[in-house]
Image (cartoon, rainbow, N blue to C red):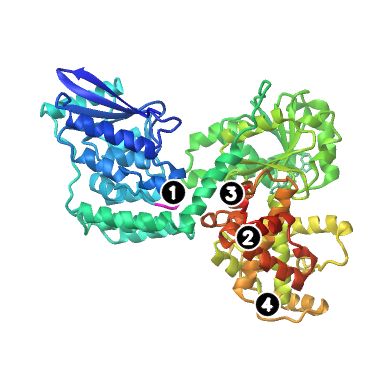
């Protein structure tokens, strides 16, 4: 397949070879393309009739960078490797100018750093996002970029991983010119002026970078990286590589960078991050549609509490008009004030300007009359978690909304099909399970009921894209994917408390595993009354033979609902969210253990991690088997995007794969023997472990 084309253009009596990268969809620099690009460059450089070269891309991309699927395969070694191509360009006797027509990321941008001039189109985006895949720019980016733009800007670009616009790139010196007319013409003119000697070649100085740099710049970058990429090693390696520019010449810096890249790309973290990268893309793929698609222009939201307010903000952020409905004027006023307060916080943190906030607020209408929802294409219910309340609301919505309007519930656990049954439009009823705070968290579980049509799912996926959410399709069951699994995780945390661990030990162990917060801290934050209500609801169907911990119920009975009441598993100083151990809770736990006849013992952090995380894995396997999730990787997306699972471990199912399913199964069998039926191994796990399979093979 031809991926590289060369055209000779005569420009002001100068012959310019325009080499175009044409490898849709993103012009990635895979092994086949590199061979063709290497040949095209070598032959045009050798061609005595060619005086200058312009390198460009076709379509929306200059180049999206390396082909990530080739990582950890022999294909990455196929020569010329990208570093060699860049060196051919850098050392060419005739000028090579990059005409950056669109998105230039990773290896795509590194390719241009070897060029002798960079001209970009106004729409171009330039960035080095490798850090997000657990690696670093390994084709010279960490050595050439600081020499071009300085250490501070290079750290921002390489460690931040966010792309720059054409203007930003020009302002920091990353590119030489933003095209005003036709990009290719401008780039040719640029190359010709180098040939004619009216403009100098841009050159990377191979000497160690001579820039006075305060060590604090690196300390700052390390601290920022720890906050942004909790537990990830790649950002630190990026910083070390940039620092190397100050002491090493280009060739030894490049050798150091190559060593660091090899270490990272072969490590578990990078494999996990790449797994999540592909898992997200798979999860958000829309259902193939036959008929006409539905478009959601206006959205109604019922309930202006914690979730309804956040959902309205998310929609308004995307420019979508919202009508917010509450049960009383007082409730709507309270909800409105919270929304204003939260937007004001966004202004304070510099996320939005005051006028942007005003535009958003104007998009949010308020009402207490159902009739005002009659022109909404979608209504999202976020009222109390009570089936009777939901049924009443859906009955009313069904009678006032247009016949093709979609009705969604934000319920955390309730049966969508039971809600749908009170309406005359069961094909248009679904769950849209947002996470708190809904204007911040990216995850959206899209719950497909027994009768929900694909057209409706597709429309909601489209909306999710517009409001910057990551939708994952899930089926109906108590808690869907995320909350169904979390029940098993918190159950083990409660049992471990009774058996001898303290709240601080459990939370500390799971934080050291990489969780954003421990399970008991998380309960305190979410509100203990919410899971208490769910346990009361499930009490009738719970087998009396199964062990039950009453610790959390007893804490609720004390009126301790977590952060919002100033105490829960921990106590909180007024105005603080810092969990402080509470001897009263230690006593309560000891008492519950005594009443249950449990002899408390020392528990290792390792046991805490295995019991809580393997509880997630075992339930996850059952969820895949029950077809509540479409694939194991969707569960990983749910846990990384919605539950603070460490991204560098790739989600619970991928983590189990990395441990090895036979080992995971053996431990689960041992827990089954010691702790009883909760631990019956998922048949899917048993089957995969016995056949040498992996979740990621499914
Ligand atoms: P909340 O108590 O903060 O808000 C509920 C709001 O709904 C209140 O303002 C109440 O006045 C209003 N409301 C109640 N009945 C109503 C009716 N008949 N008509 C109009 N408004 C009515 O609760 P929340 O935390 O926002 O939860 C709302 C829903 O979202 C629940 O189903 C909950 O399970 C789900 N959810 C909550 C979270 C979370 O972390 N809080 C996360 C995901 C999903």
Q: Identify the element where label 1 is drawn.
A: loop
Q: Which residue is mark 4?
A: 583
Q: Earlier in the sequence, mark 4 or mark 2?
A: 4
First reached walking from the N terminus: tag 1 or tag 2 = 1
Q: Secondary structure at mark 2?
A: helix
Q: Could you say which is closer to the camera, residue 640 or residue 359?
A: 640
The residue lying at 39 percent from left, 42 percent from top is 66
Left or right of 228 in this view: 405: right
Tag 4 and tag 3, C-beta contact below 8 Å: no
Mark 4 or 1: in front is 1
Upstream in sequence: badge 4 or badge 3: 4
Residue visible at 54% across and 67% down? Answer: 512
Residue that numbered label 2 is attached to: 661
Q: Check disc 3 and report the residue beneath it.
A: 641
Distance from disc 4 to disc 3, alpha carbons, whole Å, reads 34 Å
Q: Does the magenta-highlighted stretch encompass residue 518?
A: no
Nearest to N terminus: mark 4 or mark 1:
1
Query: Which residues are the magenta region?
Result: 130-135
Reading the image, the residue beneath label 1 is 73
Residue 347 coordinates in the image, percent (x, y): 49, 43
Q: Is residue 131 visible?
A: yes
């Amino acid at each position: 397949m031809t991926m590289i084309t060369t055209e000779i253009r005569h420009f002001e009596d100068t012959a310019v070879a325009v080499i175009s990268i044409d490898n849709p969809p993103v012009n990635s620099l895979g092994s086949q393309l590199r061979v063709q690009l290497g040949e095209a460059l070598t032959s045009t450089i050798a061609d005595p009739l060619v005086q200058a070269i312009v390198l460009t891309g076709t379509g929306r991309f200059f180049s999206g960078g390396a082909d990530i699927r080739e990582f950890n395969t022999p294909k990455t070694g196929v020569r010329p490797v990208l570093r060699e191509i860049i060196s051919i360009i850098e050392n060419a006797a005739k000028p090579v100018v990059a005409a950056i027509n669109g998105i230039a990321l990773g290896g795509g941008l590194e390719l241009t750093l070897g060029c002798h001039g960079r001209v970009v189109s106004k729409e171009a985006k330039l960035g080095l996002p490798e850090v997000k895949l657990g690696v670093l720019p390994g084709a010279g980016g960490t050595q050439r970029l600081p020499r071009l733009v300085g250490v501070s800007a290079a750290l921002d670009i390489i460690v931040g991983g966010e792309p720059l616009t054409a203007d930003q790139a020009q302002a920091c010196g990353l590119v030489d010119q933003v095209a005003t007319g036709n990009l290719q013409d401008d780039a040719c003119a640029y190359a010709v002026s180098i040939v004619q000697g009216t403009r100098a070649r841009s050159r990377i100085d191979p000497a160690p970078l001579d820039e006075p740099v305060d060590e604090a710049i690196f300390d700052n970058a390390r601290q920022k990286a720890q906050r942004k990429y909790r537990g990830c090693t790649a950002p630190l390696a990026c910083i070390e590589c940039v620092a190397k520019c100050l002491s090493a010449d280009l060739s030894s810096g490049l050798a150091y960078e190559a060593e660091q890249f090899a270490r990272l790309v072969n490590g578990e973290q990078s494999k996990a991050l790449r797994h999540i990268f592909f898992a997200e893309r798979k999860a958000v793929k829309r259902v193939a549609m036959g008929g006409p698609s539905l478009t959601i222009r206006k959205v109604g939201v019922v309930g202006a509490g914690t979730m309804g307010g956040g959902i309205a903000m998310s929609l308004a952020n995307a420019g979508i008009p919202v009508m917010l409905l509450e049960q009383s004027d007082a409730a709507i006023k309270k909800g409105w004030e919270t929304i204003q307060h939260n937007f004001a916080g966004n202004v304070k943190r510099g996320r939005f300007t005051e006028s942007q906030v005003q535009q958003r607020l104007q998009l949010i209408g308020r009402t207490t009359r159902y009739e005002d929802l009659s022109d909404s294409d979608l209504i999202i219910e976020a009222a109390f978690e009570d089936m009777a309340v939901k049924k009443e609301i859906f009955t009313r919505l069904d009678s006032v909304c247009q016949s093709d309007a979609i009705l969604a519930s934000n319920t955390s656990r309730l049966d969508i099909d039971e809600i749908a049954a009170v309406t005359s439009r069961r094909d248009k009823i679904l769950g849209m399970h947002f996470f708190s705070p809904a204007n911040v968290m990216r995850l959206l579980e899209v719950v497909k009921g027994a009768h929900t049509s694909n057209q409706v799912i597709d429309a909601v996926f489209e909306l999710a894209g517009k409001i910057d959410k990551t939708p994952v399709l899930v089926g109906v069951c108590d808690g869907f994917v995320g909350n169904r699994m979390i029940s098993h995780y918190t159950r083990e945390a409660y049992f471990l408390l009774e058996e001898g661990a303290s709240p601080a030990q459990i939370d500390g162990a799971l934080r050291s595993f990489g969780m954003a917060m421990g399970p008991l801290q998380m309960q305190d934050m979410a509100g203990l009354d919410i899971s208490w209500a769910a346990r009361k609801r499930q009490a009738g169907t719970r087998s009396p033979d199964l062990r039950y911990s009453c610790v959390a119920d007893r804490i609720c009975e004390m009126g301790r609902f977590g952060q919002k009441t100033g105490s829960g598993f921990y106590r909180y100083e007024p105005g603080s969210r810092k969990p402080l151990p509470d001897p009263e809770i230690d006593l309560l736990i000891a008492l519950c253990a005594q009443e249950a006849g449990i002899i408390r013992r020392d528990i290792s952090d390792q046991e805490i991690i295995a019991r809580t995380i393997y509880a997630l894995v075992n339930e996850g396997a059952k969820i895949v088997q029950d077809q509540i999730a479409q694939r194991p990787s969707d569960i990983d997306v749910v846990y990384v995007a919605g539950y603070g699972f460490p991204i560098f471990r790739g989600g619970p199912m991928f983590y189990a794969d990395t441990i090895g399913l036979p080992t995971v199964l053996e431990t689960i069998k041992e827990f089954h023997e010691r702790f009883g039926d909760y631990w019956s191994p998922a048949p899917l796990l048993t089957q995969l472990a016995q056949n040498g399979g992996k979740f990621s093979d499914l």
